Amino acid sequence: GQSTAQKQEKNHSHHLHPFSDNGALKEEGARIIESAQGVYLYDSDGNQILDGMAGLWCVNIGYGRQELVEAACHQMKELPYYNTFFKTTHNPAIQLAEKLAEITPEHMNHVFFTGSGSECNDTVLRMVRHYWATKDQPAKQVIISRENAYHGSTVAGASLGGMKPMHKQGGLPIPGIVHIQQPYWFGEGGDLSPEAFGLKAAQALDEKILELGEDKVAAFIAEPIQGAGGVIVPPSTYWPEIKRILNKYDILLVVDEVICGFGRTGEWFGSDYYGLKPDLMPMAKGMSSGYLPIGGVMVSDRVASVVQAGGDFNHGFTYSGHPTAAAVALENIKILQNENIIEKAKTETGPYLQKRWAELADHPLVGETRGVGMVAALEITNNKEARTRFDDEGTAGTICRDFCFKNGLVMRAVGDTMIISPPLIISHAEIDELVTKAQKCLDLTMEYFKS
Ligand code: PLP
């Protein structure tokens, strides 16, 4: 076979990577992941790496489940592909839609299928506007989102997202999308208590609605816990206040469940965890545990009835409801149910992970640990009291992340925030390994800044 260096050389001759500095990557060489089993990845040099991120927050049932392979194989033989446009459907789409209606909140009984989370959020933008236009309120166009939110990489997804570096690339956001403060206490809470800050961040929604005019605002979109923004677990006061504000106005709530959905919080959906009643719910990732690309926007009865009465909805994707992906998603959900994986995440694995993770708060470099269920974060700081950073570039986070990878752990860095989101099926011994390695890499990071 070819050496890692040879493969890297070929890769960089022909492959431009997402969310990467492709110039720097050419010098460093990309990591080549060749196989995976359970929570472990294996690279082209034979290293075993604990995947503390479940890929991109998606491999909820872990790697290597043969049932999903067989479901795909069976469906490919039967009907590998057909579309759901123009009044056609097929068995996997019918069955998956029924299953999603069963596991999502009670008032949500319809799904609009997509191929990804980004496509979900494009769908959201158009469905929300279609909804208000059908209700004879076409002026309700504006969607309020939050700074530092991540809602995908398409033009609409990146516009709904609140990531400044993504906006710079293409003159985004597109018109009709505005952003309010995120509920990020460690970074932005100043002298306020987390509870007081949570209220203040929520009240920014009320202020923005009043500024724009209630008759102009179509929807508010948010992740239950901001994921790619750094696992921003909102203070306890945040969601109740958001709910109170939304109840005052006739504005739709879009809860982006692309990360939180399918068990990440220890509940089926983040909406269950926070007691939210979404009008629309984008989902992807954990829907198939990432084994095949599939997503869907779950639609409430209120919105579905208007869409059904609204005539043509001129929107859809070649792969909306893709039969093979749908068959794999169905099998994935069956495994989540039959093996009580989400229940265990709530009562056993999650509490153990959070307990062990919280021990890292004693480390001299750690200003805060936080988490819910099977997702967690810690903040690297050079001053625990003042909550300050070594620099503005997130150098400490990058260094810590690189130490992790060298020591056989995937942990993600968002600036100086280190985050984990492991497969839900991780064992207690594997959690111990994760925390031990994280500790060691924090030590190495501290040594780096001392020298
Ligand atoms: N929404 C959220 C909350 C996400 O975290 C992501 C991806 O990370 C997306 C949407 C976009 O999903 P995709 O990458 O499948 O387009």
Image (cartoon, grey):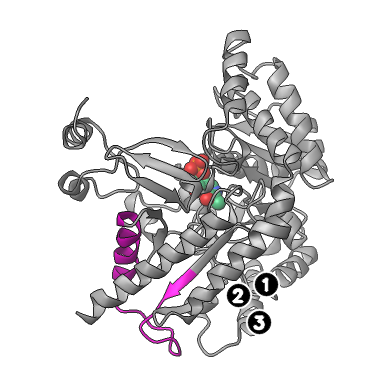
Distance from the alpha carbon under mark 3 to that under mark 1: 8 Å
Respond yes or no on whether mark 2 lies under 8 Å from ligand 1.
Answer: no
Whole-percent x, y for residue 10 in the image: 19, 30
- Going by the numbered disc 1, the residue's amino acid type is Tyr
Left or right of 230? Residue 373 is: right
Q: Earlier in the sequence, mark 3 or mark 2?
A: 3
Q: Nearer the viewer, mark 3 or mark 2?
A: 3
What mark, if any, has residue 195 been given in the picture? 3
- Going by the numbered disc 3, the residue's amino acid type is Glu
Whole-percent x, y for residue 376 in the image: 54, 64
Which residue occupies 76% across, 44% down? Answer: 104
Above-or-below relation of 381 to 138:
below
- Going by the numbered disc 2, the residue's amino acid type is Ala
Q: Residue furthest front?
A: 429
Distance from the alpha carbon under mark 1 to that under mark 2: 7 Å
Label 2 belongs to which residue?
201
Whole-percent x, y for residue 303 in the image: 77, 42
Residue 214 can be seen, yes or no = yes
Q: Earlier in the sequence, mark 1 or mark 2?
A: 2
Q: Earlier in the sequence, mark 3 or mark 1?
A: 3
Q: Nearer the viewer, mark 1 or mark 2?
A: 1
1 and 2 marks in contact (CB < 8 Å): yes
Viewer-side residue, 31 vs 184: 31
Left or right of 301? Residue 411 is: left
Label 1 belongs to which residue?
238
Viewer-side residue, 176 vs 255: 255
Distance from the alpha carbon under mark 3 to that under mark 2: 10 Å
- Residue 339 figure quarter: top right
**Where are the magenta residues, as a range?**
378-406
